[in-house]
């Protein structure tokens, strides 16, 4: 093999900026962690830690701002918050109504119902053996569409104190050795992550569905999946939560009025811009 030429030798003092690379690594994990902010009680206040992937988070959540100004900074489709957080967008199984014979394709809640069917305890029914099929029975109780989705207890979110403690300890260690660049980068990451978590976690998830007029027959029917069947029994408006329901991130204005799911989330755009600036600053 011939020796390397002089053109490569002149770049022997190349220095890789690890802080800049960290802004674009671990993005999927950072987005997944931020997406759980609506699933735990009090989780929005436990985001004050430094984490990589600020550039990816800015790109992912910046499109949720839903305005022409933020679309110029974060181009791409304006997916609803529920889709960005992985709580919508899945195609569910087929639903067949027992009384009317109506057939329709369910959405994300139908998909979650079939997934939950795989987790319940099975009970084998003795008899002539044929092709095995999992059959579940679901009795729908009255659904309050105005109530928020039930959150996991606050003690489950206390694990978030571990990265906060590590980030604070690392900041102190950098200050003790007078490494002010690392100190400022870690501190800026903590502030940016904390503000993003507080802003994104401001809303609450509710279930929205089609409202049915009074006097309609019950909505009994079956969900037919690839590896199982779910028999549903209940009132039409309650069964609609599974067949036609979807998660919606509901926000409120300062006066307590609901903004709904299609509002211009300027606060999310500002926090995403902060994350993008942090990633670019570290890269420089």
Image: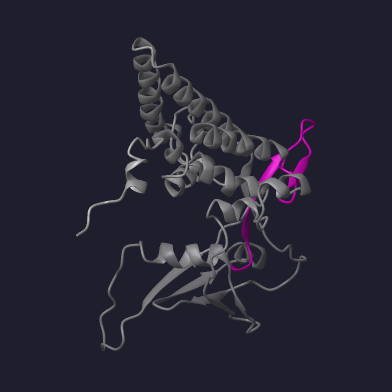
Q: Which is more toward the observer, 81 or 134?
A: 81
User: At which x and y percent is residue 48?
Assistant: 48, 27
Residue 202 visible from this viewpoint: no
Q: Is residue 256 magenta?
A: yes
Residue 93 visible from this viewpoint: yes
Q: Is residue 262 magenta?
A: yes
User: At which x and y percent is residue 205?
Assistant: 61, 47
Instruction: Judge left or right: residue 248 versus residue 54.
Output: right
Image colouring: one colour
Q: Residue at x 66, y 58 (%)?
A: 77
Magenta span of residues:
243-265
Taking 47 as reference, is 85 above or below it? below
Q: Which is more toward the observer, 90 or 32?
A: 32
User: At which x and y percent is residue 226?
Assistant: 42, 78
Taking 234 as reference, is 127 above or below it? below
Taking 49 as reference, is 132 above or below it? below
For this orientation, the residue located farthest to the left is 1
Number of marks in picture: 0
Q: Quadrant of residue 159?
A: top left
């Amino acid at each position: 093999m011939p020796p390397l030429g002089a053109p490569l030798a002149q770049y022997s003092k190349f220095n890789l900026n690890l802080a800049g690379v960290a802004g674009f690594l671990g993005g999927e994990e950072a987005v997944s962690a931020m997406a759980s902010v609506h699933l735990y009680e009090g989780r929005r206040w436990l985001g004050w830690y430094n984490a990589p992937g600020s550039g990816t988070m800015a790109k992912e959540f910046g499109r949720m701002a839903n305005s022409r100004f933020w679309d110029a900074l974060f181009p791409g489709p304006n997916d609803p918050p529920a889709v960005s957080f992985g709580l919508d967008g899945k195609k569910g199984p087929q639903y067949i109504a027992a009384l009317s014979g109506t057939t329709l394709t369910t959405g994300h809640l139908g998909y979650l119902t079939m997934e939950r069917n795989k987790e319940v305890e099975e009970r084998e029914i003795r008899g002539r053996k044929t092709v095995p099929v999992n059959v579940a029975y679901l009795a729908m109780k009255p659904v309050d569409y105005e109530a928020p989705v039930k959150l996991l207890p606050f003690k489950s979110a206390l694990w978030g104190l571990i990265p906060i403690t590590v980030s604070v300890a690392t900041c102190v260690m950098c200050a003790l050795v007078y490494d002010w660049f690392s100190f400022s980068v870690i501190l800026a990451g903590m502030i940016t992550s904390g503000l993003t978590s507080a802003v994104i976690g401001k809303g609450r998830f509710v279930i929205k569905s089609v409202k049915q007029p009074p006097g309609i027959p019950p909505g009994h029917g079956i969900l037919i999946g690839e590896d199982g069947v779910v028999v549903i029994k209940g009132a039409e408006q309650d069964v609609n939560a599974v067949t036609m329901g979807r998660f919606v991130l509901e926000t409120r204005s300062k006066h307590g009025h609901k903004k709904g799911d299609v509002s211009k989330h300027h606060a999310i755009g500002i926090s995403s811009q902060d994350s993008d600036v942090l990633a670019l600053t570290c890269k420089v």
